[in-house]
Amino acid sequence: MARPYNPRQARVNRPNSTFETQQIEGRFVNVSRMVQTPPMDESSALSRLRDLEIETPSWGYGNSGTRFHVYPWPGAARTVHERIADAGLVHRLTGCCPAVALHIPWDAVDDYPALQRYAQEQGIRIGAINPNLFGSDEYRLGSICHPDAAIRERAIEHCRECIQIAEQVGSTVISLWLADGTNYPGQDDLRDRHARLLHGLGEVYASLPPGMRLLVEYKFFEPGFYSTDLPDWGTAALACRRLGEQAQVLVDTGHHPQGTNVEQIVAVLLAEGLLGGFHFNNRKYADDDLIVGSIDPFELFRIMREIAHGGGAENIAFMIDQSHNIEGKIDAMLQSVMNIQTAYAKALLVDEQRLAEAQAEGDVLGAHRIVLEAFESDVRPLLARLRREVGVDEDPVAAFRSGGFADALARERGTASVESAYERL
Ligand code: LRH
Ligand code: MN
């Protein structure tokens, strides 16, 4: 009589199973999933959900638009203090957004310790500091990859200033995106630019105090329309490996060519210990920076599933990076937070044990249906219970809209118009 089926045994004993060969690199093999992991019960899902902290971007609260026009929103934040106050309101209404990311110089002030105290008065802390190496005329041909050494040095110096700002506001994350690239073949030497990239990142990394992380954000195009110096996860991962343990890759969900399997990039970076954080948003076409989960909620679920079952997700910075061009900024941010919580809650409900068995049996559709089951489950009651337990309204967007916040802000702040790129011509 055949021995009772034991997926753990089956997989390990399959002749060409890779586990034996990878024993020396056991840390890559997700053995834990092989262990009989009972489906996650509601209370453990709730504790995982309670641990999920989402950082909102200061620049997501202000008026933003496209090169065609910026449509001013009544009551939209106009100053760094108003942006931090709005982030504080989002935390009070969701219970899970205790930090706001700043962008320098958009959020520059003379007294950073005072700004940190102001954030604390709003019930939040200052999170990632984003250097801006694209907002001044001298960066036409790049910043740390610029052909001119003096401009490269000034770009590196700006990053060092941002590290000092981070120290003054108690932040432990520098989140660096480079707009650096070229627009025409021959415009510059691609290998020279790569060498400048690695040298520049090395200079920035060397200035990090212990305990501070450098998150390296890649993007496949724009504003570079022929080459981008940090175009993909591979280049970012190579650079981070070369830099050291305090450097990790930041995955902006809108920064990939169409058809990219983003969750596989997340899985590989997690396995390699190189996933530092996310810039969540969604897109239909390019880097559209739309509300996360608004276009492809199934992709967001698949990404959060790699986080939910992969382990090693302890130190990941879950950050939103969006611009709300035609909708209200605060309720758009609230909806984004809810969409991330929804995707994570569904991901936590995947029956990992049954899935491992179906995968071991090569039951392709069976395995897929187990994942679909979780995606199609209604997690609204679970999230309502979570929000009741953390003392916020079951529907933060409804609470914002029925709470008169928008009208109060519009009365207090009015409507500030902003010129678009073309209008400044
Ligand atoms: C670049 C990017 C980067 C930010 C900017 C606001 O597209 O994603 O993270 O600096 O948006
Ligand atoms: Mn981003």
Image (spheres, rainbow, N blue to C red):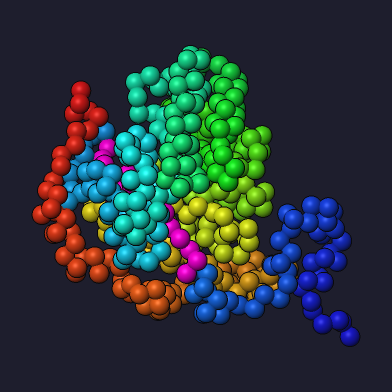
Q: Can residue 335 be seen in this view?
A: no
User: Considering only vertical position in the picture, is 259 above or below 178?
Assistant: below
Picture quarter containing residue 201? Answer: top right
Would residue 63 be counted in the magenta stretch? Answer: yes
User: Considering only vertical position in the picture, is 424 above or below 365?
Assistant: above
Quadrant holding the C terminus: top left
Q: Which of 307 and 409 is in front in this view?
A: 409
Residue at the spot x=62%, y=38% of the render?
240
> How many marks on residues?
0
Q: Can residue 138 be seen in this view?
A: yes
User: Considering only vertical position in the picture, is 233 above or below 31?
Assistant: above
Q: Which of 225 and 124 is in front in this view?
A: 124
Quadrant holding the N terminus: bottom right
- Lateral position of residue 25 relative to residue 58, left or right: right
User: Considering only vertical position in the picture, is 90 above or below 245?
Assistant: below
Residue at the spot x=63%, y=61% of the render?
311
Q: What stretch is highlighted in magenta?
A: 50-66
Residue 124 position, x and y percent, is 37, 57
Residue 99 position, x and y percent, is 40, 54
Residue 102 position, x and y percent, is 38, 43
Residue at the spot x=19%, y=37% of the render?
418
Residue 199 position, x and y percent, is 59, 24
Would residue 275 be counted in the magenta stretch? Answer: no
Picture quarter containing residue 369? Answer: bottom right
Residue that sits furthest to the right in the current view = 1
Residue at the spot x=50%, y=46% of the render?
172
